[in-house]
Amino acid sequence: MRPEDGTSVSPRLKLTALRLWQGWIKPVAVMVLIVGSFRSAVADWNDVPTGSMKPTILEGDRIVVNKLAYDLKVPFTRVRLARWDEPQRGDIVVLYSPEDGKRLVKRVIGVPGDRIAMVRDRLVVNGATVEYEPLDAASVPGLGGRAVGRVLAVEELGRHGHAVMITPTVPAPRSFGEIHVPPGHYFVMGDNRDESADSRFFGFVSRDAIVGRATAVAASVDPSHHYRPRWQRFCRALR
């Protein structure tokens, strides 16, 4: 019977299919599965298209995401197998937006049980006003003209001080009354305080929506200059 009749396949065609599977399809499939599982459960990278985390993270940065920072999940799912830590105040995390499910990069401002407020661009955490120190824009590699018309400062929140930026000419929510972070949830904000859609707009973020902690800038290109590499930002730790 001929193969096109649909009742049998020639031995030569079977042999060709077997060789194709063993010599190319199977190795590629195994490699894709291994790499996919690694990126899903261990470590990943994110290309940053927006400036909501300036001056810490710039448009065009590729950041490393440690997915084992807080827990271990089953690859390709949100099912948690083990937990050994929780996001801390000041951590930069990758999360799924509670508004539309998109992946975002933000900084943890409030952890469960915290009382958070903001008064004229200054955070108040559990009744204590956070300390700020002026920051020279020239100390931030690659920021360049993006600092024009902006005010930079070092915010002493969490384990390490970090850079934040405000834009006085942009209408933004610079103050809000005290809110209580509920159990199992976090309050997050962008370091570019006046140009960030964050918990001030979409509310608290559940623990299960947090993917991992951003730890470093692996590589960086400048979209406004024909994607020229920003060598000074390569392999730069985030804080």
Image: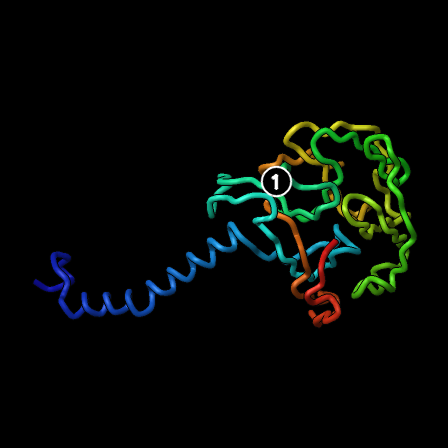
Give amino acid for label 1: Asp
Q: Residue at x 69, y 33 (%)?
A: 204
Quarter of the image for residue 211 reads: top right
Q: Residue at x 71, y 59 (%)?
A: 237
Residue 3 position within the rendered picture, expressed as x and y whole percent measured from the top left: 14, 63
Left/right of residue 64 with respect to residue 89 in the rendered view: left
Residue 224 position within the rendered picture, expressed as x and y whole percent measured from the top left: 74, 66
Image position of 36 with respect to 106: above or below: below
Q: Residue at x 70, y 71 (%)?
A: 229
Q: Find the residue positioned furthest to the left.
A: 1
Residue 48 position within the rendered picture, expressed as x and y whole percent measured from the top left: 67, 56
Where disc 1 sits, the SS reads loop
Image quarter (top left, top right, bottom left or bottom right) of the N terminus: bottom left
Image position of 106 with respect to 10: above or below: above
Return the residue nearer the eye: 156 or 108: 156
Return the residue nearer the eye: 164 or 215: 215
Quarter of the image for residue 141 reads: bottom right
Left/right of residue 81 with respect to residue 16 in the rendered view: right
Q: Residues within 10 Å of mark 1 (few under 14, many from 20)?
A: few
Residue bearing the label numbered 1? 100
Q: Find the residue positioned furthest to the front.
A: 84
Return the residue nearer the eye: 238 or 4: 238
Residue 110 position within the rendered picture, expressed as x and y whole percent measured from the top left: 74, 36
